[in-house]
Image (cartoon, rainbow, N blue to C red):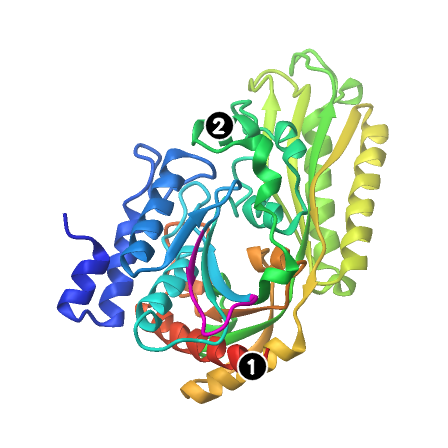
Amino acid sequence: MTTITEASLASQTTTETLVDELLNRFARLTETGHGPGVTRLAYTRLEREAHEVFTEFMTDLGLTVWTDQAGNTIAELAGRRPGPAIGTGSHLDSVPNAGAYDGIAGVIAAMVAAWQLAEQETFDHPLRFVAFAAEEGARFGQACTGSRLAAGLTESADLDHLHDAAGTSMADAFREVGLDPEAADEARWSADDWAGFVELHIEQGSVLTDTNTQIGVVDTISGSTRLHVEFRGRASHTGGTPMHLRADALAAAAELITAGETLATDPRHRGTRITVGTIEVEPGSMTTIPGLCRLDVDIRDTDDRRQRETALELIGRAERLAAERGVDSDVQVVADASPAILPLSIQRQLTSAAHEVGCSYRVMPSGASHDTQMISHVCPVGMLFVPSQNHGISHAPEELTHTTDIVRGIDVLIAGLRRLDSAI
């Protein structure tokens, strides 16, 4: 069977064609019967199959490839001299019913960069191309698990305490795909081994398209605090229970949701985003007052202090609403990551790379979390955005980034890697 790499080298495939081939290859790795889009959750067989595509491609290029105990796959192209490496890459998992570009664009950028650089030139530094595992928090509630383990922000002992909706622990999910959760700490990266890291990603917003800008150079990555909230009231007959005698768990949750929206739209909270993405109600009958309501709250912010204050405000609001409505409340912080301010020195190299390639650019924040945010605890990092179409829709089948924009981003990425190789 001819691999993508062999076919590409044999036919002198253009970069655009190779990007499209890889996009289609990864898009086919999705759960069936789960509706439109791509569903490739963290630590599942499909995610590992995507990593096998990456491994096969990089091995065919002659790179040294390995998978660490967190499930991250790394391919190394030797440099002219030994020492710390410069890295690039992104993630291969998805949320349910996702688009085909989130994370994948950055992994494909790494693959195409390796394809272009493997025989053309040698850098002083080794180059490492990374496919991270489990960036999305959709399955276990914690985002960026692969990069968090690499950065030492999550430890093997934590994996028993993270569970998916079916009750499977992350530790058991590791075992199901052939990873050893007890050895996960071995995935930690040493700062001595890494000189820098740059991630290419789709914007997941509409700023670049709205301003007709070709490249975004990220200066700040938003932090994220995730809360699991439970309101416990009293289930009772809807017709037999007067309004003033009710302990409605869903009504308390509804007030918390609107309170979060009001808080995030306050002018003093410019840069704050609050979302309730999941909600469960029991017993779930039209003729029974809800006795239990669970919801998950995602708080994002570019300002660390404001992020913490917002989380505390919502926790306090949940307690007050519970007292006012005669229900009980319980709030747990299930994940927390501070905003990351990216080094100005890396930003300058990337803006210079964009200028060198001849494309327009803007310096901008990222509202979403990314693996780069975790890797910033290991080495200096940078991040490039390429435009998202369809009003910036992401985490949905309508997600779209044009191949020409990905190729342009790859050109800027390679130019940036060259500049970092000379500067670091």
Q: How many marks?
A: 2
Residue range corresponding to the magenta coloring: 74-84
> Which secondary structure lies at badge 2?
helix
Q: Locate the C terminus and report the quarter of the image it occupies.
A: bottom right
Q: Can see residue 18?
A: yes
Would you say the residues marked 1 and 2 are in contact, meaning their CB atoms lie under 8 Å apart? no
Q: Position of residue 267 (x, y in %)?
A: 75, 65
Q: Which residue is mark 1?
A: 349
Where 186 sits versus 383, above or below? above
For image coordinates 40% across by 52% down, the residue present is 65
- Judging depth in this view, the residue of 107 and 216 nearest the camera is 107
> In percent of the image, x 80 and y 22: which residue is there?
244
Q: Which of pointers 1 and 2 indicates the residue nearer the eye? A: 2
75 part of magenta stretch: yes
Magenta stretch: residue 404 in it?
no
Q: Which mark is residue 316?
A: none
Question: Which residue was labeled with disc 2?
Answer: 175
Residue 186 locus on image (x, y percent) = 59, 42
Is 74 or 226 nearer to us in this picture?
74
From what the image shows, is residue 32 above or below residue 248? below
User: Which residue type carries mark 2?
Assistant: Arg
Q: Is residue 356 left or right of residue 167?
A: left
Q: Is 120 displayed left or right of 262 in the figure?
A: left
Horizontal side of 82 relative to 35 (left or right) equals: right
Work out how far the residue at label 1 is from the one at label 2, CA to CA, in angstroms: 41 Å
Amino acid bearing label 1: Gln
